[in-house]
Amino acid sequence: MNYEKKPGNKAFLKIGLFSGLFFCLFFGTVLIFLYDLHAALIMGSISGLIFGLFMGLILYFFSKSKKVNNQTKLEGVDGSEIIYAGAANHFIKREAVGGKLYLLNDRLIFKSHNLNVQNHTLSIKIDNIDELTFFNPMGIIKNGLQITLKDGATEKFVVNNRDIWKKYIEQLIK
């Protein structure tokens, strides 16, 4: 099987565009209350575009940071054992904990970076997975992956390329 190891720059471009659109709409809405509609549309669009691009760049450099990569690196795991890996958020209560998700032959491992409140490592054995489904965070973004375990517990992740994650995990389950 030919597995990819990490998402390309398209994922980061997509994040930048989504954040630009979000901030454009957010700033435009706020500015409507402060100014007239026409000024709000112009100022919201320009500031949203600039801030969105800025956030996209910050996310790109953050994800490529050596410090973050060292914090999320798996100890005692040979690189050849990793089938697929990528940046992810794991939902714990109300926090989307940032880190990296790894798929190995026998388990799925999430390891958070140290810039979270709830730092942790989560390991899920492949034979303990009952069902994989998708969900859309905030109802619109198609990057949520929900894992239901055989005991009924669920774990939610936000990942890039959720179709690929699901395909690879389901191949291991079978």
Image (cartoon, helix red, strand yellow):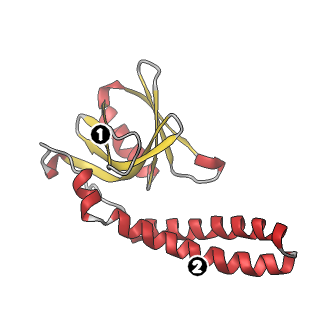
Q: Quick one: which residue is furthest to the top in this view?
A: 151
**For mark 2, what is the residue?**
50
| Amino acid marked by disc 1 | Ile
Q: Earlier in the sequence, mark 1 or mark 2?
A: 2
Residue drawn at the location 86% of the way across and 75% of the way down: 37
Q: Horizontal and vertical percent for residue 131?
A: 45, 30
SS for dot 2: helix
Verify CB contact (< 8 Å) between mark 1 and mark 2. Answer: no
* Nearest to viewer (mark 1 / mark 2): 2
* Up/down of 18 relative to 70, above or below: below
- Identify which residue, 54 or 76, lies in the foreground: 54
Can residue 18 be seen here? The reply is yes
Residue drawn at the location 32% of the way across and 49% of the way down: 114
- Identify which residue, 139 or 168, lies in the foreground: 139
Examine the image and state in which quarter residue 66 appears. Answer: bottom left
**For mark 1, what is the residue?**
109
Question: Horizontal placement of 124 versus 24: left or right?
Answer: left
- Identify which residue, 148 or 90, lies in the foreground: 90
Question: Horizontal placement of 113 versus 23: left or right?
Answer: left
| Amino acid marked by disc 2 | Ile
Question: Horizontal placement of 166 versus 93: left or right?
Answer: left
Can residue 8 be seen here? The reply is no
Q: Quadrant of the C terminus?
A: top left
